[in-house]
Amino acid sequence: MPKFGYTDAFNHRLNDKIVVVDARDSLPTCKNGKQYKKREIHRIKGICIHHFGGDQSIESVAKHYTSPNNRFSHQAIESIPYTYCIDKNGLLHCCNDIEKVVWSQGTKLFDGDENADYLSIAIQGNFNKKTPNLDIMFSLLAFIKEAKYFFSFGNDGIKGHYNFGKEQCPGNHIESFLKYLQ
């Protein structure tokens, strides 16, 4: 019988609101790649929202990061560097266990470990060029609402990657929405 951990509990809660695709066992991985640390769940202060910067699929983004010479290093990493992703149809994909500290917020602008403190969610598309559709926005809002409740953080825990020094992420069309929520 599979264990029922934080990720499964959160996905179960989300499934009452939106469709969650469990992609943890279907996305490309690299067992020999750099491994993520384990997250202490009580550390979670909020979420950090990203965009892909293009229309590539979640699978192709995962394949890129689990291959050598990816954006992070000259060595593959174990899996896609996001905990969740929303595709262009608004489906939410669970890509990693919540307990994994994925490398997506990385910055030296702040003390501490923002990767451990914030869950990451990436959205398929480039939102400097276009406005997200209603299906994406509905899934993003449902995710934010449930994450705030489940992990007990307020609106100040809703971050865009721009809060950690990446000015173009998650794109100005989502950034203005996030600033409204914050």
Image (cartoon, rainbow, N blue to C red):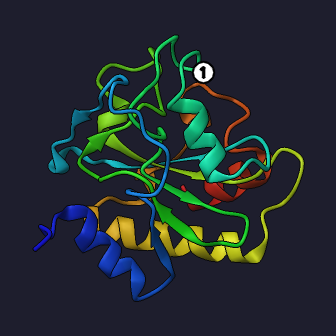
Residue in the picture at 75% in, 47% down: 56
Q: Residue at x 51, y 81 (%)?
A: 19
Kind of residue at badge 1: Arg
Residues packed near mark 1 inside 10 Å, few (<14), some (14 to 19) or many (20 plus): few
User: What is the count of numbered marks?
Assistant: 1
136 horizontally vs 33: left or right = right
State the SS at label 1: loop
Residue found 69% across the figure and 49% down from its top: 175
Residue carrying label 1: 71
Q: Position of residue 15 (x, y in %)?
A: 41, 83
Q: Which quadrant of the structure image shows residue 95?
A: bottom left
Q: Position of residue 32 (x, y in %)?
A: 33, 25
Q: Quadrant of the N terminus?
A: bottom left
Q: Is residue 164 left or right of residue 89?
A: left
Does residue 21 sit above or below 64 in this rendering? below
Instruction: Tell which of 118 and 104 is nearer to you.
Output: 104
Q: Position of residue 13 (x, y in %)?
A: 32, 80
| Residue farthest to the top, as pictured | 74
Q: Classify 27 as above or below 105.
A: below
Left or right, residue 97 beside residue 72: left
